[in-house]
Image (spheres, rainbow, N blue to C red):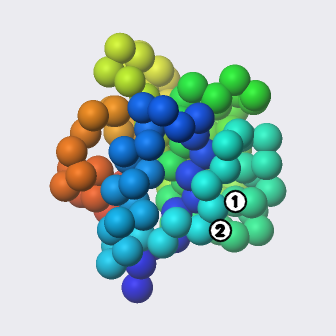
Amino acid sequence: MPMSVVMAAGGGDFDPIATTVRQSAQHFQLVHALPSLRKAVGVLRRDRPTIFLMGLDLPDTSSLELIRTVSQELPTRVVVMCRRTNAGAAIEALQAGAAGYIFTGTDDYDVVRLLKAAAA
């Protein structure tokens, strides 16, 4: 059975990752694709997906606080997406409770592998 995924990202550099998730139907089911983080907690509490895939570039709420909330209150595993130039943010996300991170430009095989590892 595919793992459920909720994604929140601003698009752009993260579109290839979203495409990989959508095209990997044997592994993942993209339940929601949110354009912001504002509604994320409500959606996550309601749907309880296996993975919450979030971009660190969304300015509408504190990404680190959201990671802490999700990792403390839900069984959902948080995986963050960021640019290699923002690797420090990935480390901060891991310290806040994220289960993993994916850099933009990561190939399809590794996106699938990293998401499956984070969910385990």
- Residue 86 lies, with reference to residue 97, above or below; the image says above
How far across and how far down the image is residue 16, in percent? 36, 45
In this picture, residue 38 sits left or right of residue 77: right
The quadrant of the picture occupied by the N terminus is bottom left
Depth order, front residue of 75/101: 101
Residue depicted at 35% across the width and 66% down the height:
23
In this picture, residue 23 sits left or right of residue 53: left
Depth order, front residue of 29/72: 29
Would you name the residue on which mark 2 appears?
48
CB-based contact (under 8 Å), mark 1 and mark 2: yes
Pick out the residue farthest to the bottom.
Answer: 1
Residue depicted at 69% across the width and 70% down the height:
47
Would you name the residue on which mark 1 appears?
44
Mark 2, Cα crowd under 10 Å, few <14 / some 14-19 / many 20+, is some
Residue depicted at 61% across the width and 45% down the height:
8
How far across and how far down the image is residue 26, in percent? 33, 78
